[in-house]
Image (cartoon, rainbow, N blue to C red):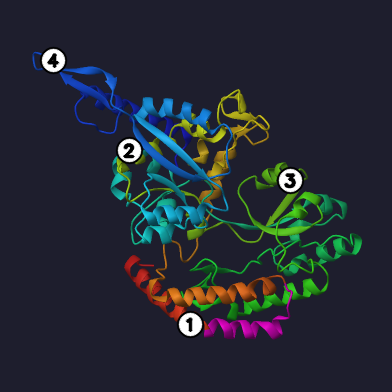
Amino acid sequence: MKKRRGLTLLLSLFLLTSMALAGCGGKDNGGSGTASTKTETGGETKSTEKEKPVKLIWYTISGPQKDQDKVMAEVNKYVGEKINAEIDLRLIDWGDYSQKMQVIAASGEPFDIAFTSSWAFNYVESARKGYFYELDDLLAKYGQGITKALNPAFLEGSKVNGHNYAIPTNKELPAQAVWRFNKVLVDKYKLDVTKATTLESLEPMLKTVKDNEPDVYPIPSNIGPYLPYDFALEGLPVGVPIDTKDFKVVNVWDTPEAKQVFDTMHKYYKAGYLPPDAATKQGNEHEKTGKWLVDKQHTVPFADILWSDSLGYPIVSSPIHEPMVFNWSVTGSMQAISAKSKHPEKAMEFLNLLNTDAYLRNLVNYGLEGVHYKKLSEDTYEPIPDSGYSMPSFTLGNMFLLYKLKEDPKDKWEQYEKFNSSATNAPLLGFQFDPTNVLTEIANVKNAVDEYGPSLNTGSVDPNKVLPKAIEKLKAQGIDKIIAECQKQLDEWRAQNNK
């Protein structure tokens, strides 16, 4: 991944090229859009007015922003000067985004750009439905800044049927599960979190806290215990072992590793380490009260600082496994261009600008300087509380261009690059399972997983009695057919890609 200096040079060359093209007049090459007219002698001269800006509708995921119109007015002034475009930003709240975007895309309602991911407005599914524009040629012609900025694994791992249909956000590339601890209790009882590697290794710490804090449930909720598998389908126990050599697809619940996890969680549940209603408990009230010891999260560089700042008390974490690049981590935040967009070239120009221009990226993210944030130095800022504008950073584009908080290490983004470079690839990276032939079975198996999963994951039931019933139910609902179809596609993919 290139350094910021390289991005700056690239942007300079891009702007110089745009200026040169605009100076030639005539055909619109995606530059400023300046029109040209013929003189009486047949020569050309620039017109004094630009062509009408191209309006781009951009849907993204976020809570409402009071000052959105103020910020977008400044955005459009800048984008208009750079690429002769106007952005109509439309925000959809977190809980509604997937459903509303599915309706918009399926109905053919016009839009140009939309946020998509492995967890909201599902990227692979939407690409296969034909909602998104194939970007290979657009990236080569108008997105060169993006391809230079991104680790190649982002674009390679997010291909669907060999093609790119969305632009991944330049952020952490791999995923790394960690045990996240409430450091207040860690310090109070002098717990050594470096010993927290496996689920079983947590037991002495859980016991210490429960014995001394009877009103605290050390594991506060359904943490989704870690299983060392690369899953082929989100939400289904179908995958291959992380360290696979033969790439045999299995029913993960019907493995020794799953049985051990369920047994351990049941032991913890009986010991009172989880709330009685853990299987159905909703929300994160424990984060507000501080009455918890450990949960499982996925980390990024300096995540402990971010968590501590967010929760208002110190957090410390310990890794469960080494950083690994999964399909879902590569596709965790992306921007796609609609297959029905009337302006795909201009949409790619905007995405390229957003991902290479530090001023624009920070403007969209943080709002107006002096109104929504204070700039402390060239690359650091301080948010103004309750200012009316605070967008989710990871959803919008190249995070390496963002200003840092004063508490952030000076080498924050360099450490992100180091984190990305340290990762290994999960075995199924680049393989995208096509569910077309087993859609009914997938729906039925998901229902069975929803029925048994929460109670098994939280230890609320005895796995010796319930797990055999769950496995039987999965088989009755068609998991073996899903596994066979997945194995067939995986074998074909490996043969085609020399894996």
Q: Are marks 4 and 2 in contact (CB under 8 Å)?
A: no
Alpha carbon of mark 4 to alpha carbon of mark 2: how far? 29 Å
| Circle 2 residue | 346
State the SS at label 3. Answer: helix
The disc placed on residue 220 is: none
Task: Indicate whether 14 appears above or below 444.
Answer: above
The boundaries of the magenta stretch are: 459-476
Disc on the earlier residue, 2 or 3 = 3
The disc placed on residue 480 is: 1
Q: Residues within 10 Å of mark 4 (few under 14, many from 20)?
A: few
Alpha carbon of mark 2 to alpha carbon of mark 3: how far? 41 Å
Q: Write the residue at 69% across / 46% down.
A: 307
Q: Nearer the viewer, mark 3 or mark 4?
A: 4
| Circle 4 residue | 39
The quarter of the rendered structure image containing the N terminus is top left
Alpha carbon of mark 3 to alpha carbon of mark 1: how far? 43 Å
Q: Main secondary structure of the magenta part?
A: helix
Q: Is residue 304 left or right of residue 157?
A: right
Q: Is residue 396 visible?
A: no
Disc on the earlier residue, 4 or 2 = 4
Q: Residues within 10 Å of mark 3 (few under 14, many from 20)?
A: some
Q: How far across and how far down the image is residue 413, in percent?
A: 55, 39
Q: Is residue 48 left or right of residue 108?
A: left
Q: How far across and how far down the image is residue 147, in percent?
A: 38, 44
Task: Indicate whether 336 appears above or below 233.
Answer: above
| Circle 3 residue | 311
